[in-house]
Amino acid sequence: MKPLPQPLAGVFFDLDGTLADSARDMYDALAALCTEHDTAPPEFGVVRETVSRGARAVLARGFGDDPAAIDAVLPRFLDLYIATGMRHTRLFPGVAELLDKLEAHAIRWGIVSNKAGHLVALILAALGCEQRVAAVVGGDTLARRKPDPAPVRHACELAGVMPAQCLFVGDDPRDIQAGREAGLYTVVAGWGYLDGADPRDWRPDAIAIDADQLSGWLDRA
């Protein structure tokens, strides 16, 4: 792996599959929607690995790949997702300690997600992180979304840090592409959903097996 930036000023995270394990609530919303349409929901494991790709990818597991069919059920799916209250959504193991360490060392941290901003806000509130985060960029904050680098650059601007002194951590190839093109050091969250892919193919600067390993790298930096 490449050496981490020195000094390190910021760490930015994708949300679903990186900072937060939100798959169960997404699945519960899909299962409820399938029940309303009198169709059997897919297995949880099949849905879990797609969560990082967003609501449409999750819906495709239950309703097929026809864009028109997915668009027709998307609003109801989002209503059902909000109705879960994000009750099963949790920080991944080791992430709480990692965030504490960043804050103890005055390293700014933020979120760059393709999820709509109001949904990001609901998750951060459920996790008790809404007052801690230095920057939040949702999928509707700008006209462009990941893999475009603009949202990552915007997060750096909001947090008041230089991209070359920051990490971007994610579990999807769009995260790594966006972070790299924005000029950040890129880390694959090996604990995330990954969609069955080999993250080495994404050409990250590093792959962390878990949040504890990433935390250890920060200690050495």
Image (spheres, grey):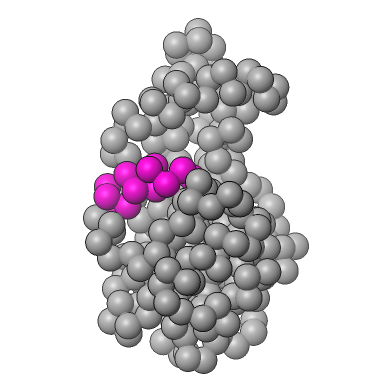
In the image: residue 147, left or right of residue 6: right
Front residue of 24 and 33: 33
Figure check: 142 above or below 59: below
Whole-percent x and y of residue 100?
29, 73
In the image: residue 26, left or right of residue 100: right
Q: Quadrant of the N terminus?
A: bottom right
Figure check: 63 above or below 92: above
**What type of secondary structure mainly makes up the magenta span?**
helix
Can I make out residue 169 in this image? Answer: no
Residue projecting furthest to the right: 201
Can I make out residue 112 in this image? Answer: yes
Residue drawn at point x = 27 percent, y = 50 percent:
125
Whole-percent x and y of residue 90?
34, 50
Q: Is residue 117 magenta?
A: yes
Figure check: 142 above or below 162: above
Residue drawn at point x = 55 percent, y = 85 percent:
4
Q: How many circles with numbers are drawn on the protein?
A: 0
Residue drawn at point x = 41 percent, y = 59 percent:
136
In the image: residue 69, left or right of residue 84: right
Residue drawn at point x = 32 percent, y = 52 percent:
124
Whole-percent x and y of residue 221?
47, 90
Residue projecting furthest to the front: 143
Front residue of 187 and 209: 187
Q: Is residue 103 magenta?
A: no
Dividing the picture into quadrants, the one containing residue 60 is: top right
From which residue to which does the magenta span run? 115-127
Whole-percent x and y of residue 25?
39, 36
